[in-house]
Each structure stands twice: as structure tokens, then as C-alpha cells.
Image (cartoon, rainbow, N blue to C red):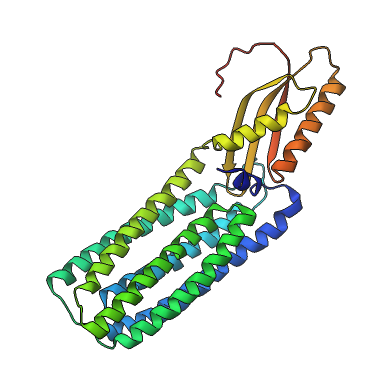
């Protein structure tokens, strides 16, 4: 996780409502786009019989399924913390992303089998002009949607929307490949190009599924922020003139929420009120860099060792 990603995540009240609205809008937009593409691609696939177009149709169908899962996950993740879930419901996003990765990976394997069958039994593509038209439409819609989703991800840090954006970014590449392939098959008669494009799309889908699954797994396992973010946290804390040292820094993310906690070492002779003041000042300085994070500080007398494991 980068500084920008950490700074853009979290659940402090300032931007929570706007973030929620943008995330929901992103999920609705993806469902609308995918549904439109499924309908058009299905009819054109029936006309052309192209397995490459089938691969794009299957990908759009997966996108609708993934987007519906995302809509549910985002709704759950945005629910406030309650008695049974004191840290909120952010990990619903990671579970949704993991489900998407499994669905996409399984579908890619199915597509490889279909393409293999077409390699053994080649078939000339009919009505290729219709296929070219629908793939051009798909390309335009995918580009517009991805640009919007990435903007939402930069603003909110949402893993679910990020996973959805990854799918549609893949669609953009797929649409270009299928569009070029259909043009070559229609005008030059290169029938073997159809299943080869489908196989290439399948491997791209598998790579995307693995990437999304890794990000989801990291969140579920409370993976620490990257070294650059942790260094920024340390530098910010230690910049306070009355802070002697810090230790036991722990960070994690849960959906659009991020959490930072550590032990703050100060002069043992300080009063409780003075120590509290310093902690508040350190906390405010961290909110400048990480405006939506939740910060938890434990105050310690400087130099007092603790018999507990500590990590860098």
C-alpha cells in the first residue's frame, strides 16, 4: 500500500458520505454497462458463431455477476460498526473480490476448453461486420467506465471497486484483441485466429484473477502497509519534539477503512495531562497525512522495556 492509498482509505466522517455515494454509483454504472454488453454480444455471437466473441460475452456475463456481488459487498462494507462488528464491515469487500477471482478463474478454464475444440474443428465466421460493430461499442463503453472507476478508487481506496475496475480494464484489452481478430477473420479469412484470441483472453483472465485474489487475501490476513507508508508514519510521529521514540507500530486495512496503532514513548516525568496533549498533537499530525485513518496510541514512559514481541 502506498501513501496515497493509505491516505485515501478509512472512515473518518469528513468524506464518508461522499465516498459511499461514489462507490455505489460506480457499482451501478458497472452493472448497467455489463448488462448492455451482454445483450448485444449474445445476439451478435448467435449471428457470427465466433468463439472469440463468445469469450468476450462470457467475460461480460462474469462482469455482471461480479458487479452484483460488488454492489452487495459495498453495501455491507459501508455499514457502520455495531455491537458485533466493532471494526466495521469492511472485509466484505475482500470476500467479494475473492469470490470474483474464483469465478473469473473457473470461467477462463472453460473458455480454454471451448477454444481448444474450435482449434480442432475450425469454423469460418459469418456476418463479421456485426461482430466488429458490437466490439467497437464494447471498447468505448469499457474505456469510459474504467476511467470513472479508477477515479472512484483514487478517492475512496475501495478494493471492491478496484477489483471491478481490473475486470473492465481487462475488457478493454480483450475488446481490442477481439475487434482486431474479427476484422482479420472477416476481411482476410484467418479462421484459426478466432480460437487463438479466445485462448489469449483466457490466460489474461487467469492473470487478473490471481492479482485480485492476492489483494483480497492480503486484506483478509491484515497485511501491513508497505514500507514507504510505515516510514511516513514513523517520520511524522518522531517529528514531534517531545516524542522520545515509538515502537510496536501496527497497520492494516479493512475495505475503505485503515487502522494505525503504536506505542508512543515520552518523558516519564510528564503528567498524564501533558502526555495526553502530546498524543493528541501526534494524532492530528497523522491525520494530515492520513485523513481518513483511525489512529490508536498507547502512551509509554521512555526507556521502559516490554516483554512482548515487536516487529520493525
Q: 6 above or below 197?
A: above
Q: Nearer the viewer, residue 99 or 30?
A: 30
- Report the quarter where the N terminus lies: top right
Q: Image height check: is 230 above or below 45?
A: above
Q: Does residue 41 appear anywhere in the picture?
A: yes
- Look at the image and tell me in which quarter the C terminus lies: top right
Q: In the depicted view, which residue is nearer to us: 275 or 143? A: 143
Relative image position of residue 294 (x, y in whole percent): 69, 39
Residue found at x 41% / y 50%: 211
Image: 182 above or below 114 = below
Question: Which percent across, then down, holds residue 239?
Answer: 74, 28
Q: Nearer the viewer, residue 264 or 234?
A: 234
Question: Which of the 4 quarters of the picture holds residue 201?
Answer: bottom left
Task: Left or right? Give the position of 34 relative to 249.
Answer: left
The residue at 23%/70% (across/down) is: 195
* Image coords of residue 220 (percent x, y): 49, 42
User: Which of 114 and 234 lies nearest the eye of the viewer?
Assistant: 234
In the rendered structure, the answer to whether residue 183 lies left or right of residue 290 reads left
Q: Quadrant of residue 296?
A: top right
Q: Residue at x 35, y 59 (%)?
A: 205
Relative side of 80 to 108, left or right: right
Examine the rendered structure and indicate whether residue 80 appears above or below residue 103: above
Residue 216 spot, x, y in % from top left: 47, 47
Residue shown at the point (34%, 59%) measured from the top left: 204
In this rendering, the count of numbered labels is 0
Residue 88 shows in this picture: no
Amino acid at each position: 500500500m502506498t501513501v496515497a492509498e493509505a491516505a485515501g482509505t478509512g472512515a473518518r466522517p469528513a468524506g464518508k458520505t461522499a465516498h459511499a455515494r461514489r462507490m455505489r454509483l460506480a457499482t451501478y454504472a458497472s452493472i448497467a454497462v455489463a448488462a448492455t454488453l451482454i445483450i448485444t454480444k449474445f445476439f451478435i455471437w448467435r449471428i457470427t458463431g465466433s468463439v472469440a466473441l463468445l469469450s468476450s460475452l462470457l467475460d461480460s456475463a462474469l462482469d455482471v455477476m461480479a458487479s452484483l456481488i460488488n454492489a452487495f459487498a459495498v453495501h455491507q462494507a459501508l455499514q457502520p460498526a455495531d455491537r458485533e462488528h466493532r471494526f466495521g464491515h469492511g472485509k466484505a469487500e475482500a470476500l467479494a473480490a475473492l469470490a470474483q477471482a474464483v469465478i473469473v478463474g473457473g470461467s477462463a478454464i472453460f473458455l480454454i476448453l471451448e477454444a481448444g475444440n474450435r482449434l480442432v474443428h475450425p469454423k469460418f465466421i459469418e456476418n463479421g461486420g456485426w461482430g466488429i460493430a458490437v466490439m467497437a461499442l464494447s471498447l468505448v463503453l469499457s474505456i469510459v467506465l474504467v476511467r470513472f472507476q479508477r477515479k472512484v478508487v483514487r478517492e475512496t481506496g475501495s478494493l471492491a471497486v478496484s477489483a471491478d475496475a481490473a475486470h473492465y480494464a481487462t475488457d478493454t484489452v480483450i475488446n481490442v484483441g477481439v475487434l482486431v481478430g474479427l476484422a482479420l477473420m472477416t476481411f482476410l479469412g484467418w479462421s484459426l485466429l478466432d480460437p487463438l484470441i479466445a485462448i489469449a483472453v483466457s490466460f489474461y483472465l487467469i492473470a487478473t484473477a490471481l492479482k485480485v485474489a492476492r489483494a483480497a487475501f492480503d486484506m483478509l490476513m491484515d497485511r501491513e502497509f508497505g514500507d514507504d507508508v510505515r516510514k511516513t508514519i514513523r517520520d511524522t510521529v518522531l517529528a514531534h519534539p517531545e516524542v522520545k521514540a515509538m515502537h510496536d507500530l501496527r497497520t492494516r486495512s479493512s475495505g475503505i477503512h485503515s487502522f494505525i496503532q503504536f506505542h508512543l514513548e515520552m518523558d516519564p516525568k510528564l503528567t498524564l495531562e501533558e502526555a495526553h496533549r502530546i498524543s493528541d498533537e501526534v494524532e492530528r499530525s497523522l491525520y494530515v497525512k492520513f485523513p481518513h485513518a483511525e489512529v490508536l496510541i498507547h502512551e509509554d514512559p521512555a526507556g521502559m522495556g516490554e516483554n512482548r514481541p515487536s516487529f520493525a
